[in-house]
Amino acid sequence: MSDEIKYICEDCGKEVGQVIADNKDEKLNLSYLMEMSKMLLQKYGFKRPEITPDQHILGVALDWKIQKEDGQWDEFLPLYEPQAENYETSGCTVWGTENALEILYKYLFKIEPNYSERFIAILAGITLEGGDPHTVAETIRKQGLINQELLPIPETYEEFCQPNPMEERFLAKGKKWLDDYSFRHDWVLQGKETKENRISAIKEALKYSPLGVSVSAWQEEGGVYVDGGRPNNHWCVCFGWTDNGWKIFDSYNHSIKIYSYDSEISFAKRYKLEKKTFYPEKQGNWLVDLIISFFNLIKALIK
């Protein structure tokens, strides 16, 4: 490489030329070099989270109920929506988290929702540097969700970042969602598990929900994606497993991928979604209002 210009891989801190040299056993033709350079410089938007004692860890605090004993969520996959169709949003943590939640919603309530990534990206403070998945999940837990049609994906990145601050009418819609649903999440992997523990933990957690997972995107070998020795730089959904690896629903390129068991998944989250029940006193008030409205209608018709 030129002595004047050096491209640095932001994931591992090495010069791209050095990373390529470290992989000299590969077939180093021009197309391979170009693909390797592109892959190393690509920013998907995953920031390594700092897990603190107040964050829920698998099995510690939340009461979870098994949803799918086989841990396979294939039939509930949502509509594929790319995170970088016309421009890069660096919003993989938003797309991955919402995709997992939409899969879970479709399984639980037999309806396929389509929530606004733009709404959560703005509220979670996602920039072109990305964001961490815990902040995104906490934003949903505290601010709720709104339908895609209210804040769709616009033509430009500048429009995608607006309105900021968020308009009150959209915040009210998010609060209404929280009136109807309870959303929780906890960590399955914390970045320090062995390969064996990682595999068993993911398979067990998939019984409860599709998982948000960190991966190293995207190097394909023989139809399976591998980390290539690189750290995780992307967040997406794990929705099951095969003999060859994890089933991944992605927000990039082809939406479905197989990610090798030998490749690193440093972090994973599972999600819990419940529809809130009406308490008797609240339901009673609702019935009273309905009865009063009915009699007012009758009186109006008589007149």
Image: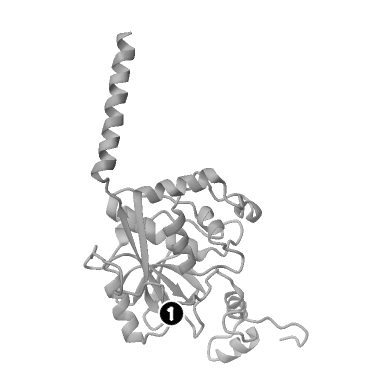
| Pointer 1 local density, CA inside 10 Å: few below 14, some 14–19, many at least 20 | many
Q: Nearer the viewer, residue 110 or 227?
A: 110
Q: Is residue 227 above or below residue 121?
A: below
Furthest residue to the front? 281
Furthest residue to the left? 69
Image quadrant containing the N terminus:
bottom right
- Image point (37%, 66%), residue name: 185
Tell me where residue 240 appears, x and y as whole percent: 31, 69
Q: Nearer the viewer, residue 172 or 21?
A: 172
- Image point (76%, 88%), residue name: 3
> Would residue 52 be found to the left or right of residue 76 on screen?
right
Tell me where residue 99 appears, x and y as whole percent: 41, 59
Tell me where residue 155 appears, x and y as whole percent: 62, 50
SS for tag 1?
Answer: loop
Image quadrant containing the C terminus:
top left
Furthest residue to the top? 303
Q: Nearer the viewer, residue 156 or 287?
A: 287
- Image point (49%, 51%), residue name: 116
Instruction: Write down the quadrant of residue 262 in the picture.
Output: bottom left
* Numbered circles on residues, count: 1
Question: Is residue 251 shown to the viewer in this render?
Answer: no
Q: Is residue 289 above or below residue 28?
A: above
Question: Is residue 298 shown to the viewer in this render?
Answer: yes
Colour convention: one colour
- Image point (41%, 79%), residue name: 190
The residue singled out by tag 1 in the image is: 266
**Residue type pointed to by label 1:** Ser
Furthest residue to the right? 4
> Would residue 206 be found to the left or right of residue 219 on screen?
left
Tell me where residue 152 appears, x and y as whole percent: 53, 48
